[in-house]
Amino acid sequence: MSKAREIRVRGQVQGVGFRPFVWQLARGMGLRGEVLNDPEGVLIRVAGDGLDAFEAALKAEAPPLARVDAVESRAVAFAPGESFEIVASEGQGAETRVTPDAATCDACLAELRDQEDRRHGYPFANCTHCGPRFTILKGLPYDRAQTTMAAFPLCEACAAEYADPGDRRFHAQPVACAACGPRLWIEPEAADPIAAAAQRLLEGEVLAVKGLGGFHLACDATNAASVARLRERKHRPTKPLALMGTLPMIRAACAVTEADKALLTDPAAPIVLLDKRGQTLPAAIAPGQSTLGWMLPATPLHHLLMDAVARPLVMTSGNLSGEPMVIGNDEAREKLAPFADAFLMHDREIARRLDDSVERAVPPMVLRRARGRVPGTQPLPEGFEAAPQVVAYGGQMKSAICLLKNGQALLGHHLGELDEALTYEAFLAADRDYAELFDHAPELVACDLHPDFRASQHARSKGLPVVEVQHHHAHLASCLAENLWPLDGGKVAGIVLDGIGLGPDGTAWGGEVLLGDYRGFERKAWLKPAPLIGGDMAAREPWRNALARLDQAGLSDWADELFADRPVAMARMAADKEMNAPLSSSAGRLFDAVAACLGICPDGQSFEGEAAMRLEAMARASSGLRRYSLATGIPTPSVASGPLDTAELFRAIAAGRRSGARIEDLAFAFHLWLVRLFEGAVLGAMAGQSVDHVVLSGGCFQNALLSALMRKALSDYNVMIHRTTPANDGGLALGQALIAAATRL
């Protein structure tokens, strides 16, 4: 009997062409045996010479969509047949993972544009290396009968490709062509849907376009009137609009580094935030911002549309304000009719709605984790091998669900704000969906400490043990988990800067220095609390936060000048009497306060984070300390603890405004001041402790300038940041899940 091994491959290895890859590799090396799918991944039984090289190639040469987490092998007594074969799958279950949707590969794109190819111009071409996956999946195991492609029986030609291990469409579940697959049309009807859609876009109309995870609203991005029309119809005055274009189009409008290009061309095809360069597009695309959000075409349909239009397109989510993205044809006709002049539609059902992911290459960050990234999983850190199955439900905003099972964490897709009834329905549907798809039977439930969050209320309704997790502790643990910090790795210092999270003392936190790990934490320093005058209104109207901070700094006279046309006296009365004016250490509201003092949207924000984003854009336009620093000078880092006073900051800003300093330089100086303040605070937290790692988490670290300055200031220490999970509340569930699991380990 010849040398033989049984090789187990774990990871993202089903639905990505891994078995035909193994088949071709083994045959090319003269090996005999078999390969199959089973509940744990891919199983190979192989015999012959050169098995070490074969095993090494399984990871080194894996297909583009594969992610190999482990290759395990053992010698076995195995009598192979005369050749190497792909054999029927064994067992059932969901121990392996489902592949995220993937952008059109080069081979399919070449066929799409080849007039001699039978898929020329076909908007739904795909293969094992690309195409829809999670958005068409209805159940496991992942085969055509369990997807929305079940409604399209294969024609003879497609069936032959599907059955041929040597073809890149071998067992590609969405495989189709014009003879047997989904069809495209436009309403109002036209003979050539793509040509008609392009013509309408070029004439300035707004189109509803059905994509992978839902509908987009599209218009000509070079047409200022068309952009204005879309904004007016959607009641979206200033929030940045996403763009779709080719690489040359993107380079004409933005600086594109090699890292940016790599992220743009990633199979996930996310929206990538890029620095503006030049004024080639209307300012209304992203008013007051220094970046634009671009994505490349993700599907053959989008490629065909871009080829026909030959100019950049706005491609923003098709939904009513605050509601989830529209996915159904009838739903689109009903809800998007006030926005769209025409509908580009198809008859392939979308099994689950997925927004576009939003990311940045440098510094690396994920702002919204969705299409192309979900349901990707990540391994749990050392020490969590025996973790029970856990489900965690995140927070109220940027909601996402996390599952723990068999040493893996699955952080679900961005759902949105649970205050919205339809978003909460989508949250409940996602909870059922993930549990069924991944055969998940949780022993523990984790949620936010806030009792009124809908996610927390849902957690308590499950009838299972519930672990309530403080908001900022969850942020800390989320970053630890992503960086595979061991369960017993010891404590770290964490700078957690965000909007608001309920503290165990009953106050609203948001600008904290913590010392802790998965099992617990101490609050070492925090921004001196200020009243949120008007409660939730303080997050919408930045002048309220500025008034509170200026009054604290003894600058009431300047506040009266700045906000003379606002109800200042009434606001002060509410703060004095503690009427709907809870105290908060929120860093997000500090950004709002500074922005309002600099004249940046003081009266109101049309979307969450607008003031802070405009403030960052202003700061990035500054020449920095070469021209200006705060009037009192940038403070030298000092060991600090407890409440961190902001009075010095606002006195310096007032002095700067009165002396005629540039707004851009004051904005930059604020960022540097905040960094120095928290540098001193984190040094204080680490003093006398055996701690040399610092975590940066919370939504404020989506600010690229703040992140870069903070990492530079702490360069003598080991700094951990978010790269693949959101620093904002979209990552909370991951931290909650790990903290809950740690209670059982």
Image: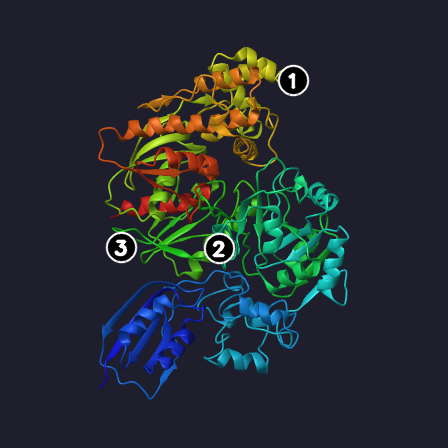
Callout 3: few (<14), some (14-19), or many (20+) C-alpha neighbours within 10 Å?
Answer: some
Relative to the observer, which residue lies in front, 95 or 511?
511
Q: Residue at x 68, y 54 (%)?
A: 311
Q: Amino acid at mark 2?
A: Ala
Where residue 691 sits in the image (x, y, percent)? 25, 36
Where residue 729 sits in the image (x, y, percent)? 45, 41
Q: Quadrant of residue 192?
A: bottom right
Secondary structure beneath dot 3 equals: loop
Secondary structure beneath dot 1 equals: loop
Q: For residue 262, which numbered disc appears in the image?
A: 2
Marks 1/3: CA distance? 60 Å
Callout 1: few (<14), some (14-19), or many (20+) C-alpha neighbours within 10 Å?
Answer: few
Marks 3/2: CA distance? 33 Å
Where residue 348 sits in the image (x, y, percent)? 61, 65
Which quadrant would the N terminus be assigned to in this image?
Answer: bottom left
Q: For residue 385, which numbered disc appears in the image?
A: 3
Circle 1 residue: 565
Relative to the observer, which residue lies in front, 633 or 598?
633
Going from the N terminus, do you reach mark 1 or mark 2 first? 2
Q: Amino acid at mark 1?
A: Asp
Residue 30 position (above or below residue 641): below
Going from the N terminus, do you reach mark 3 or mark 2 first? 2
Relative to the observer, which residue lies in front, 642 or 634?
634
Relative to the observer, which residue lies in front, 10 or 104?
104
